[in-house]
Amino acid sequence: MARISASVYTSHVPAIGAAMDLGKEHEPYWQKVFSGYEFSRRWMTQHRPDVVFLVYNDHANAFSLELIPTFAIGTAAEFAIADEGWGPRPVPGVKGHAELAAHIAQSVIQDDFDLAIANRMDVDHGLTVPLGLMCGKLDATRDAWPFAVIPFAVNVVQYPVPSGRRCYALGQAIRRAVERWDGPLNVQIWGTGGMSHQLQGPRAGLINAEWDNRFLDRLIAEPAKLAEMPHIEYVREAGSEGIELVMWLIARGAMADGAGGSPPRVAHRFYHVPASNTAVGHLILED
Ligand code: DHB
Ligand code: FE
C-alpha cells in the first residue's frame, strides 16, 4: 500500500518567491528566512517522496469570485504556473499524479467529503513558494520538481470557509485514501499558508508571535483540540489572513495519531518574523 511518511507545514509568502527569483536569498534580510529551510532542503534529499499532496489556497488566480470551491483536488497530469500579474514565476511546471488523485477523490468523496474535481488549475504562490523553500531554486527551462504533486486547493479567501474540525477530519480521510492505494508509494502531505498576517485594513501588518508559537505547540501536541478553535479566534489573534492556518489541520489530520497510532516525531521547527508583512512558521513531522 501507499503510505504517508511525513507532513510539512510552511508559510507561502509571495515575497519569498520573489526573493528566490531575483537572487536575493543571501541578502541579510532574506538569509534569516531561508536559514530556517537549510535543514529542510537536506531533509528533502534524504526523505524523497514519490508524491506530495500539497494543501494550499488559491489567491483568486485559478478561481475568481465567480466560482468558489471549498475543496478542489487537482486530478490533471500537469499544472501550469499561474500568472499573478507579473507573468508566471520562472519555476518548473508541476507534474501531477492523475491516478492517485482520482483514487483519493473516489475514496474521500465516498467518505462523505464533497470535493470539486479540477482537471485544469494553474497553481499560484501558495503552491510554488513551498516547493522552492523545500527544494531550493530550480531552473524553469532545464529542471523538474523531484516528485509528483497533487494540488489541493482550499477556500480561505471568501467566507464561508471550512472549519478546523472539517479540515482535520478531511486529513484523516486522506490518510485512509492513501492507505487504500494498491502500490508502494511514499506520500508526504504539506499544509501551507499563515502564520499571523493581515494584509489590509486598519490592522494591516498585524503579527502575533506568541499566538503563532502556541499554535505550533498545539498543532504538535493536541491537534484534535486545536481543530475546535473557531474562525473568529484566528482572525482576531492572527489577522484576517491568519485563517490560512486552518489548512495546516488537513495535513496534521493525516498523521498516524489521527488514526489511533503514535504521535509524529518533530524533525524540525522554525519561526521567524518578519517576511514582508508575515510571520513565517515551519514544521516537519515524521510518522
Ligand atoms: C502575502 C500573501 C499571501 O498569500 C500570504 O500567505 C502571505 C503574505 C503578501 O501579499 O504579502
Ligand atoms: Fe496566502
Image (cartoon, rainbow, N blue to C red):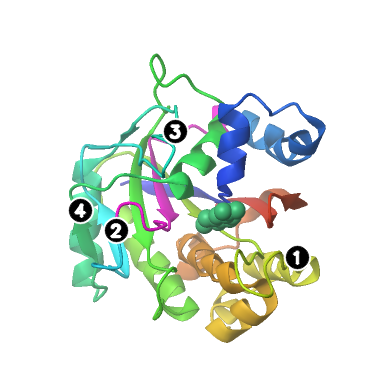
Which callout, 1 or 4, points at the residue further toward the start of the chain? Answer: 4
Which residue position is annotated with label 3?
A: 89
Mark 2 close to ligand 2, CB under 8 Å: no
Q: Secondary structure at mark 4?
A: helix
Tell me how far mark 3 sits from mark 4, CA to CA: 30 Å
Residue 180 circle label: none
* Residue type for callout 3: Arg
Name above or below for residue 76 compared with residue 170.
above
Q: Quadrant of residue 203?
A: bottom right
Which callout, 1 or 2, points at the residue further toward the start of the chain? Answer: 2
- Could you tell me if residue 12 is visible in this image? yes
* Residue type for callout 4: His
Which callout, 2 or 4, points at the residue further toward the start of the chain? Answer: 2
Q: Are marks 3 and 1 in contact (CB under 8 Å)?
A: no
Which residue position is annotated with label 4?
A: 103
Which residue position is annotated with label 1?
A: 213
Q: Secondary structure at mark 1?
A: helix
Tell me how far mark 1 sits from mark 4, CA to CA: 36 Å
Whether residue 162 sits left or right of residue 193 in the image: it is: left
Whether residue 83 sits left or right of residue 215 in the image: it is: left
Residue 119: percent from left, percent from top? 17, 49
Residue 170: percent from left, percent from top? 37, 69
